[in-house]
Amino acid sequence: MEPMNVCSHHLQEAGATPEEELAFALATACAVLDDLRGKVAPEHFPEMVGPISFFVADIRFVTEMCKMRAVVKLWDEITETRCGIMDVRSSQFLYGVQVNSLVLAEQQPENHVYRILLEVLAVTLSRNARARAVQLPAWNEALGLLRPWDQQWFLRMQQILAHEIDLLEYEDLFDGNPAINRKVAALKAKSRAELAQIDAMGGAIGAIARMKLWLVESNSARIAAIENGETTVVGVNRCQNGEPSPLIGGEGAVIAADQGAEADQRGRLAAWKVAAPARAQRRGNGPRRCGAVFGQYRAPTGVSVAVSNRTGGLEPIRAEVERFRGV
């Protein structure tokens, strides 16, 4: 049983820095453990800690490898000092990896083959921080629905890593590397500082509004760095000219949505509306099934108050757009 799976993959795709991803994910896990502490008998508490798992993402090779080495050590600290867990089986950091689709742009999608391979190596090379499960996107996810062949192609990538190379036969290749040690130490220090700040706000529950604001600000900075060329994305803001890809030319490059699905749904909805008065009459004054939806549903993300510097001051433009729409 896994009482909780903390998905920091979503945090990184929302713009989190590596330090924020670690701190926010660990703060979420701590909030769950703090809540369980008073609801579970002390002798059974380790059984709640052990199965908690994490689902993380990765983009930059060395940073992500060091991030996973750092979070393993941070989780050991938390389970020992905060939870009093000394049993390795209960404190082991369990995680799977979703290779981050944040970098999978529509431009030059064939480049994603290399990106995904390098990203999966970041979480398999380091044996002391190796993912127990890896989920790879396909090269053309930014274009549309995947064909079975696309999914098979990237399944083969995992199988080649597992069966054809000797990576899994050796101990950790990076133990003692001074550059790796420095990066891991820096990530741990910054993540600890952010985690302490969240704790001071009442933990992940009390700090959730502020955490969302931090995500918006970080994502805004990430986008701005790409737009001004500070961060290079090959095919997007550099090396943009090239030969057209034969992989995406012509019909069938991605699975197209059924063009008749919308018309079919509209027809069934119209028929349902025509029959609605008769249904209401049969029900009399009893419960009525209106089936009506008014307006456009938007989930409560909580980021509406987190207006970044890049989107602030646009009220006059928005007002002009609304005026134009009303013409």
Image (tube, grey):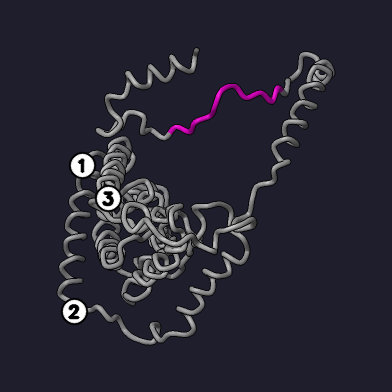
Check residue 297 for magenta coloring.
yes
The label on residue 131 is: none
Distance between the alpha carbons at the discs numbered 2 and 1: 34 Å
Identify the image quadrant of residue 218.
Answer: top left
Give the labeled residue for mark 2. Answer: 176
The label on residue 20 is: 3
Is residue 58 or residue 26 the one in the foreground?
58
The label on residue 200 is: 1
Dot placed on the residue nearer the N-terminal end, 3 or 1 = 3
Magenta region, residue range: 290-300
Residue 223 at x, y = what percent? Answer: 31, 45
Mark in the foreground, 2 or 1: 2
Disc 2, disc 3: CB below 8 Å? no
Dot placed on the residue nearer the N-terminal end, 2 or 3 = 3
**Element marked by disc 2:** loop
Distance between the alpha carbons at the discs numbered 2 and 3: 26 Å
